[in-house]
Amino acid sequence: MEKNIRIVWILTVITALLMIGGQGYWLYNQYNYSADEYMQELHKQLEELEEQELQIRYLRSEEEKGPSQRISISYNSLIKSSADSLKLPKITSDTSILFYYTLAEVESINVDSLLQKGKAWLKNDSILICDSFQVQNMPDDLLFNSSLRHTLQYTCPFSVALFDSLTQSKGIRMENVRQTVSDTLIWHGSYHSYRKGLVHVMKIDYPYCPLTKEVLTGEIAVPLPPLLKQMMWQLVGSLLLILLLVYCLVYQIRTILKQWKVDELRKGFVNTMIHELKRPVQTLKMCIAFLNNKPMRTDEQTVDAVVQDAMFELDNLSAYLFKVRELTRADDEHTLLSIRRFDLSETVDKLIRLNNASTDKLIRFESTFTERPLWMTGDPVHIANCLSNLIENAIKYSGAEVCISVEASLYDQLLQIKVADNGIGIPPQEQKRVFEKFYRAQNIPDANLPGIGLGLSYVKLIVEAHQGHIRLLSHPGKGTTFIIEIPQ
């Protein structure tokens, strides 16, 4: 049985760990999925901010140059018709693109430098500026956007501070921001992600001037609170599921252990009863065998001794059966106590007389009461049985000379009963277990002493049924004191 319980326990723990691990793996994937969704939404916001940044620079450029000084951009067909007259290099529309900027005033452009590089020509009172870039199969909308960004670098250059102010206005915090030149052409803003522990980091590339491969790079750490808020219901549901699973598994194990304990108690009870009943049955068998021998019955003195031994063993059998019956009754929650008012001092005196006559030990009783009669409210039969058990244990687990003290007092509607002896005492490590069913202390000097370990458990049940409690004070070799307190 223990092996099966151990196997069930191991399998249960493994199942719980697998379920928790599976749930954790699912939450981990949900976390990554939520992070990806969050970064996609964040990228859309960044694309909007990129367009907003371009629009702001364009408006600033128009405000600075005035309506009559706007930039004009020409490409494709205009390039072909103007290339020869401007004496520009031969180009094809699918591999090259030329930009023409006609400005009335060009304070913001270093014209001399452009003239020396062959990127500017004087024409009438205007200046014609030309840049050439190798491109392939570029859509018109992307061509226009890239051209506009390039022209704005002459009239209103890109500013990191402007873009940073736009991102901060949306609550986006960028780190490691820097301007660089890419190895390849990047037409659209893009990002890729990596992780620092559980934190997802979004590395962005913003091509503020695609044709010259000028790119703004930066990193954005994805904050946990938005992700946790987005995953709130998944987290709560998973937590509840895990708690329910753990509770069910623990409840299952507790039920199995309880059933195992009940089975162990049952087997222990049967074995103990067999062991304890074996001795009186054997003694009675011997007594009957002796009485069945007619020649031996002629010795009256021996017959009297045999009859006395038989009566003693019958008393032991009756006591065992009585304890089992009373414990079963007390353990039944539907069993009601017969509560009435009775004189406790009279009950104690009767128990002292009966126990004095039932043993050959030298017993000295001391009884102390705050008043006589000492009236209490309770079940007189069960209370008498409890005190009888304590007195019997005091006699049983003591030497040849026994001193038993019984004290009872009533103060402030609390009845206190003390039963003390000078017996062998109870070791500290066993004092909490003596009230368990079928438990017997390990320091009993004689293993043949009768007893099945039900007396003190019965006493505890009866005291608690009276809404009271019991405790003990004991020192090995110096005796034990049981203290019962019952409210009145």
Image: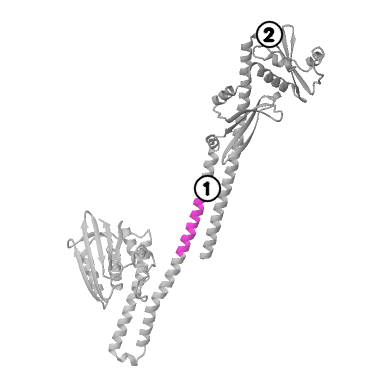
Residue, far left:
372
Whether residues under marks 1 and 2 lie with C-beta atoms below 8 angstroms apart, the answer is: no
Residue 104, disc: 2
User: Looking at the image, is 379 positioned above or below residue 26?
Assistant: below
Marks 1/2: CA distance? 74 Å
Determine crowd level at label 1: few under 14, some 14-19, many 20+ residues with C-alpha closer than 10 A: some
Quarter of the image where one finds residue 346? bottom left
Quarter of the image where one finds residue 328? bottom left
Depth check: give the residue in front, 385 or 356.
Answer: 356
Dominant secondary structure of the residues highlighted in magenta in the image: helix
Depth check: give the residue in front, 305 or 227.
Answer: 227
User: Looking at the image, is 302 positioned above or below residue 198?
Assistant: below
Quarter of the image where one finds residue 309? bottom left
Q: Which residue is mark 1?
A: 242
Queried whether the magenta region covers residue 150, the answer comes back as: no
Could you tell me the amino acid type at mark 2?
Answer: Ala
Q: Secondary structure at mark 1?
A: helix
- Whichever of labels 1 and 2 marks the residue nearer the N terminus, that label is 2
Q: Quadrant of the C terminus?
A: bottom left
Q: Give the residue drawn at x 57%, y 49%.
A: 21
User: Magenta span covers which residues?
Assistant: 242-262
Q: Give the residue drawn at x 23%, y 54%.
A: 413
Where's residue 49, x and y in %?
Answer: 61, 24
Depth check: give the residue in front, 189 or 388.
Answer: 189
